[in-house]
Image (cartoon, helix red, strand yellow):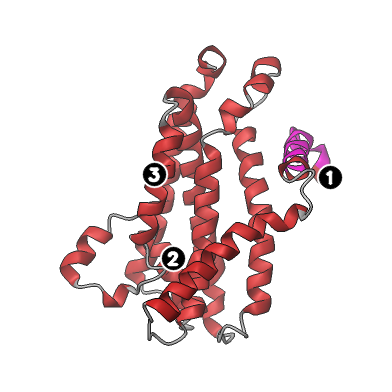
Amino acid sequence: MKSLREIPYVDLVFNLVHKEIRTRYFGAALGFAWSLGAPLINTLTYWVVFTWIFPNKSPNFTLYLVTGNLHWMLFTQVSSSSCELLTGAGGLIKKIRFPRILIIASGLLTTFTFWLSAFAIYMVLYPLLGGTFSAAWWAYPLILLPYLIFICGVAMFLSIGHVLFRDLKHIVDVILPLLFWLTPIVWHVESIHSDKMFLLNFNPILPFIHGFSQIFVYGTVPTLHVWIKIYVIAFASLAIGGYLFRSKVNKLVEIL
């Protein structure tokens, strides 16, 4: 039976991830802790605004805010970094022949590694934020997996899209803050009138974040309608991103 390291290209992915983790905060006094600094300050800012300036009286609002922001952070970090995955690895792509999807895989693994550290802290603070462990937690992997599939599709789309259209990175950086306010992180789905909810349903992140909040904040399992949307969006993202990536990846050397 083969060991993990004997699988083709595993060493390449491992080295790419290891290099990125080592160099991202090389020379910084706080090192790895900086990966948590910006999200923490961001969460604290929203907590202060919606607790003291514009008070939100919803029960367990702090837990609701942190839960949504934690999972939103994974999406934004992947979206922001994916644009430059292929362009940043242009030298490697021109020199060595290997499956280009490994560049995407290494980028996703790097971001996910940093995100897991934030999730570990969330788990430690969970009871202090007012959370209680419930039977609904069995559903979490069933939402997290399609969420990762959705993010993978987005990463492939943005990475190859940025090679073809270099302004894409700037467009993404503008859209992400706007998309944040269309996602149920500082507001509740139940508080939105049905006629406005129709428009918000075009936000692909909404059912995922809503599902995470239902599990961690309210201890309930999402409805069948939410499950269907989650899996349809996840595999649609993978199909679209995968198609664009496969159709353009062989021309990367010429374009870069």
Residue furthest to the left: 195
The three-letter code of the residue at mark 2 reads: Ile
Circles 3 and 1: CB atoms closer than 8 Å: no
Q: Quadrant of the N terminus?
A: top right
Residue at 57% x, 64% y is: 41
Q: Measured from the top left, where is residue 224 in percent x and y?
A: 35, 71
Secondary structure of the residue carrying numbered label 2? helix
Mark 2 or mark 3: name the one nearer the start of the chain: 3
Residue under the image location 79 percent in, 52 percent down: 29
Which quadrant holds residue 210? bottom left
Residue pointed to by mark 1: 3
Magenta run includes residue 33: no
In the image, is 53 to the left or to the right of 18? Answer: left
The residue wearing badge 2 is 209
Out of 42 and 188, give the one closest to the viewer.
42
Residue topped by disc 3? 174
Classed neighbour count for the residue bearing mark 1: other residues with Cα under 10 Å, few (<14), some (14–19), many (≥20): few
> Counting other residues with Cα less than 10 Å from the Cα at mark 3, is it few (<14), some (14-19), or many (20 or more)?
few
Query: Which mark is first along the chain, 1 or 2?
Result: 1
Q: Is residue 9 visible?
A: yes
> In the figure, residue 49 lies in which quadrant?
bottom left
Name the residue type under label 3: Val
Magenta segment's dominant SS is helix
